[in-house]
Image (cartoon, rainbow, N blue to C red):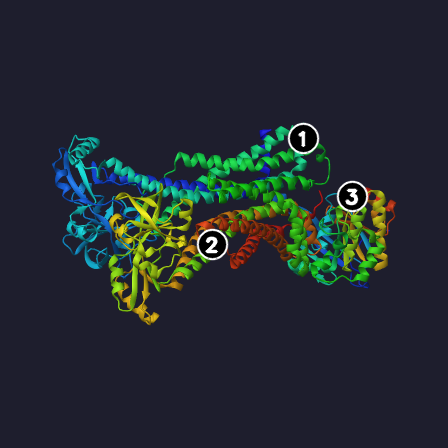
Amino acid sequence: MLRVALKGLLAQRVRYLLTAFAVLLGVAFMAGTFVLTDTINHTFDDLYTTIYANTAAVVRARQAFNPGISYQTQRPPIPAALVAAVRRVQGVREVSVGIEGYAQLVGANGKAIGNPASGPPTLGEAWPLAADMSPYRLLAGGRPPQGPGEVAIDQHSASVGNLKVGSRVLVLTKQPPRRYRVTGIVTWGSAASPLGASVTLFDHKTAAEVVGQPGKVNEIDVAAAPGVSEPELASRLRRALDDPSLEVVTGTMVAAEGQDAVHQAMGVFDTFLLVFAVIALFVGSFLVFNTFSIIVAQRQRELALLRAIGASRRQLVASLLVEALVIGVAASIAGIAAGIGLAAALKALLGAIGVSLPATGIVVGERTLLVALCVGTAVTLAAAVLPARRAAAAPPIAALQAVDLEPEDDAAHRGAIGGALVGAGALALGIGLFASTGNRVALVGIGGAVLFVGVAVLAPLVARPVSAALGAPIAQRSPIGRLARQNAMRNPRRTAHTASALMVGIALVSVMAVFATSIRASVNSILDAAMQADYVISPASASSMATGFSPHLEAAVARLPDVAAATGIRAGTVKIAGRTMAVLAADPTKVGDLFDVGVVAGRIGSLGANDLAVSEQVADSRHLVLGSAVPVVFPATGRKVFTVRAIYRDRQVAGDYVLPLAAARSNFVEQLDYQVYVKLRPGVSAAAGRQAIERVLASYPTATLMDQAQYKAQQAAQIDQALGLVNALLSLAIAIAVIGIANTLALSVHERIREIGLLRAVGMTKRQVRATIRYESMLIALFGALLGLAVGLALGVALVTAMRTSGVTRLEIPVAPILEVVIVALLAGVIASLSPARRAARLNVLEAIATE
Amino acid sequence: MVRARADGLRASEPVPAARIADGVKIYGRGEAAVLALDHVSAAFAQGALTAVMGPSGSGKSTLLHCLAGLDRLTAGQVLIGETDLGSLDDKSMTLLRRERIGFVFQAYNLVPTLTAQENIVLPLTLAGRKPDAAWVGRLVASLRLEERLGHRPSELSGGQQQRVAVARALVTRPDLVFADEPTGNLDSRSATDLLAQIRRAVDAFDQTVVMVTHDPRAASYADRVLFLGDGRVVEDLDAPSPDEILEALRRLER
């Protein structure tokens, strides 16, 4: 029986090729993600180990909690005087001092190098005292910075900013902007820069002044004398220093922290990409199912013959599943190979866009091989089970019947199963979206998948009338269109299943479109209602609450005679009620004039240093009223208790908690504004105001001045950018569906060789043959798009409704994207038809009509 | 009566519906080359039913395909009326088949998704032309298909399907109709009926028909029977009786 299976496979190899390709794409994406993350993790594991090779212990301030991956310095500095105490400890061979803070390099062309708001941080550090504990390696021709006017910079920034030893460079810090001379270019271990961050190294004294605090350092790094182990040295230091606000950790632990941070960041990246790999495989499984269904239908007579000569049903199923197994394994292996190539290409791409990675080999872990192989094979096998069982159920008598039979479905049966699946999927989705308990993400994912399968099961029931309706316009216009429409209606199950593969991608694109449009509308309506400032000064492309500007910017703008008020907003990571979150802080006396967050109780203006404001939603869910106590844990300063003095409505912009500026000053480590709101004096024209502010901003290249309309446009652009990324990744799912349509058409053409031959004989031109296939393809695609839009819009509405409490207050159905989806689907149909149409047109008429 | 007509032309007669002059067809190359037509010349007079007979491999289907513009000669000339098929590209050839030639095949004559009516007018549909309702009505009536027009091929008997094919072949009033074993898949009653219909079409509409057949009874409906052997025309009988045909076939097999 095994031989029969393999022979069957060989005979159908061309038809199976595209199926295998669909599985291959999904597996390649998955394997590529694994390989890329493994490679990057491995690279940085090595790098951190090397960098901390000579550091036996690190003395630094204790943190109340670990705020996680953050580009902000979260640890308060420690007294520089501790260095002397550390030096005295026995076993200490050498001591180095770390000072770190915000510093933004500005390239020779006046453009900021790196933008912490949209990418890796821009750091300022002190040149390390001990070369063997320094992660930085000075390149030939440079020397360490000395004195207040000199810096060394990382190699990546040097090449981006076109800076060389001897160049003059502008550096922004919390101090006013200042120019420095570059005395050296450094690498970070073997990498051009640490994780793509831009680094400015000052001499010790300058660093303490411009990025640190005078008399303070961030950490003290210690090298051990020969024969003293890391834990031993660490415990000696602990005993010697004996200060609960300090912690002493070994170099190995610090390296591990760095490695963990990279792993965590890569984990997020990894999960994000894997979601799309899973979607691709899901769509691929539709394709496998459909191809198998068609091929076994075409081989019905052969299979019935096997049954007639004594093969059992079980043997037949097994033989078909062996075919699926071989395809699954082969496609998965090829997919892994393609994935390795993909990872190498992505790594090169990351390098090209500025995330410099040290040159190391590609890491292919066991996980990659095992998971990708198993998943690819399992998906193929699972999708083949139903078609195999159905084929094996054919009576042996079918071998003797002349007609190809693809039995009609029992509509009631199909309706019941499909309806049940749709119901179950919608229920799981609903619980996932609206309930507050359980694993919501998993519920939404599984619910969505079940819903899609359910719709695919139901789709054949409507395929005939829908194809008839969709095809009506072309059927009226041309006879070829009529033929195409009839072809699409001829086998509703096939048409529906082929369309369903496209439905998945289209539905997801539609959900994202509804979601993004609604968020945009919500943001706009809030800004319209709440923003009273004339201008916002914000990082060039603010997407996070990362580092911002020196507070000098706020002061300089506030001093302008045209400006009535200017206030900076700060952000920091805190832990409230067990949750780590970013909160905003602002000057309570000024912010009320510039931003109306819809205060429903209390007054923001009356917030004292130990008071805070909360959103109405949090107040309701946590039963907070004016006067309630809210403990807030700061990474640097630990637990502080605040009193609720105001409750506001709009959490979209302000978040759930707003702290007074005084609290930020005393508890945040970084004292930088991430946005500055500006209101002009009455009577000052917008143009004059802008001109005055722009003059101040000239020395802050990362700062962008935006009026309300521009600010809204910037917010919209960010949403569109995220949407674009997601759509780009979803296009993989659509591409696989296009392969599916092409595959179905190729199989149909194969099946209709004689019919096409007849049509050619009685006068159908090649162009007409191609047009028939193209129209049929477009009809299938359009049907898929329609299913996708229906499901997608419904899901989008559900999602937006579920997100209402999170600030998505407006529901908007985007019209342009819907039209785009339809156009994309039609294009997909045309593309899918190209190869089958060409093959059909090229058919040799004689061979096609030759009698058996 | 046996006459040899080397060039297939008689000067006094009008232009024949189709002719082949010195037609050579070779399949394959080198060692594997097969000579399917070996310098065949023949003319097919207008308004006549010509049968082409011969054993398997005699080249009769090749002759039909080359005459009908479904295949091209390796050497020699095929003319449909005054049109030299050798000068036509694929598109012109297709249009010629659509406009000027009708086909009836042994099986699989109809598009399964179209009704009998739609199948009949298919060549016109492909040309984007409106069928002449009176003409279609006459054809349908003459072929007794009035009751079956709305049915799909799968709902028609074999004989009905072939009659629909005949109606389709005639619907464009083509210069000539090629029939390739039109009765090959039919029982004898349906076959007799179909042959009578083809004969009637030839007589009533002055239609030129060239029919390839194995069946001496079918050939006996013809005005003329060409016998092929090893790619050559070996005999050419005018209105032979079934006995004369059997006799000729026997001679061929010797």
What x and y, as percent, mark residue B245? Answer: 84, 46
State the separation of the CA atoms marked 3 and 1.
Answer: 28 Å
Label 1 CA crowd tier, 10 Å (few <14, some 14–19, many 20+): many
Residue B16 in sight from this viewpoint: yes
The answer to which image quadrant residue A104 occupies is: bottom left
Q: Amino acid at mark 2?
A: Thr
State the separation of the CA atoms marked 1 and 2.
Answer: 62 Å
Q: Which dot marks residue A518?
A: none
Q: Nearer the viewer, mark 3 or mark 1?
A: 1
Q: Which dot marks residue A809?
A: 2
Q: Amino acid at mark 3?
A: Asn
Q: Nearer the viewer, mark 3 or mark 2?
A: 2
Q: Helix, strand, or loop for circle 1?
A: helix
What x and y, as percent, mark residue A835? Answer: 57, 51
The residue to which callout 3 is attached is B185
Q: Amino acid at mark 1?
A: Arg
Q: Is residue A782 left or right of residue A349?
A: right
State the separation of the CA atoms marked 3 and 2.
Answer: 71 Å
The residue to which callout 1 is attached is A307
* Residue A840 in the image: above or below residue A257: below
Residue closer to the observer: A192 or A134: A134
Q: Residue at x 62, y 57 (%)?
A: A767
